[in-house]
Image: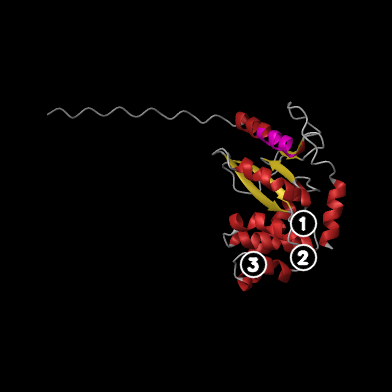
């Protein structure tokens, strides 16, 4: 089932390996789309959110991950990268449960790339059952029972539902798709590839930063009161 979905994804989003075109300004309607009306971000406000909607079954997401890792290494202080596992239904939702369980257990950094590898290289996920997903995380050093319990917890169910609603509200119907500040939807194109996708993200982050209201100047320090006359 999941393998068929992965093959379907490869047909739906062709040409991602084509070398990017000459650098130029991102094209509205091609490299990115404006989300109207703008939607709340997936995470808390305070930073410019770059939310990648992905799925572990998606080969293009697996191919995109090394690019994301390099981009993340130079992430500015005012930008937050948020991973949002797609929840399109069926076994994909079990992969989402695995992701959010690992996140709840504080293990995302050491398991994220490894789960892509388990699916696409090691072929350890074939049915996408909760038990199979738990086996993968157990192989990465997590407690299997704890992972299963967490996947079935109310907290993880809430996160999966939020991910589903976020994708619906922002118009995501394929992965990987990146949502910038709840306002822009970015996808890879055949001519610009993943490098061009990240250039578009940087362009939109800069636009969002420039549009942010300037912080009010700090009030001058009060002058010290004169000492009372003796």
The residue identified by callout 3 is 139
Task: Tell me, yes or no, whether the two marked residues, 3 and 1, touch with CB atoms within 8 Å.
Answer: no
The magenta stretch is 194-202
Nearer the observer: mark 3 or 1; the answer is 3
Q: Main secondary structure of the magenta part?
A: helix
Residue 2 in which image quadrant: bottom right
Q: Secondary structure at mark 2?
A: loop
Task: Tell me, yes or no, whether the two marked residues, 1 and 2, touch with CB atoms within 8 Å.
Answer: yes
Which image quarter holds the N terminus?
Answer: bottom right
Q: Is tag 3's residue or tag 1's residue first in the polypeptide sequence?
A: 1
Residue at horizontal 71%, vertical 36%?
195
The residue identified by callout 2 is 128
In reply to whether residue 199 is colored magenta, the answer given is yes
Relative to residue 208, is residue 169 drawn left or right? right
Place of residue 102 in the rendered image (x, y in percent of width and height, measured from the top left): 62, 61
Please identify the residue farthest to the left as the structure is shown. Answer: 230
The label number, if any, that marks residue 25 in the structure image: none
The residue identified by callout 1 is 57
Residue at horizontal 63%, vertical 58%?
111
The one of 160 and 70 positioned closer to us in this rendering: 70
Q: Is tag 3's residue or tag 2's residue first in the polypeptide sequence?
A: 2
Nearer the observer: mark 3 or 2; the answer is 3
């Amino acid at each position: 089932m999941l393998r068929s979905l992965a093959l379907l994804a490869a047909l739906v989003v062709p040409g991602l390996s084509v070398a990017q075109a000459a650098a130029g300004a991102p094209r509205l309607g091609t490299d990115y789309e404006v989300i109207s009306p703008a939607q709340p971000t997936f995470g808390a406000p305070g930073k410019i959110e770059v939310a990648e909607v992905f799925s572990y079954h998606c080969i293009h997401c697996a191919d995109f991950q090394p690019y994301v890792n390099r981009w993340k290494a130079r992430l500015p202080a005012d930008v937050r990268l948020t991973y949002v596992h797609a929840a399109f239904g069926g076994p994909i939702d079990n992969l989402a449960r695995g992701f959010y369980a690992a996140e709840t257990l504080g293990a995302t950094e050491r398991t994220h790339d490894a789960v892509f590898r388990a699916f696409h290289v090691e072929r350890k996920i074939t049915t996408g059952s909760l038990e199979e997903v738990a086996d993968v995380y157990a192989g990465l050093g997590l407690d299997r029972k704890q992972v299963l319990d967490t996947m079935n917890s109310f907290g993880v169910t809430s996160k999966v539902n939020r991910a589903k609603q976020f994708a619906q509200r922002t118009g995501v119907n394929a992965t990987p798709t990146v949502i910038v500040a709840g306002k822009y939807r970015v996808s890879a194109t055949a001519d610009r590839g993943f490098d061009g996708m990240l250039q578009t993200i940087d362009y939109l982050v800069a636009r969002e930063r420039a549009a942010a209201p300037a912080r009010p100047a700090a009030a001058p320090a009060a002058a010290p009161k004169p000492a009372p006359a003796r």
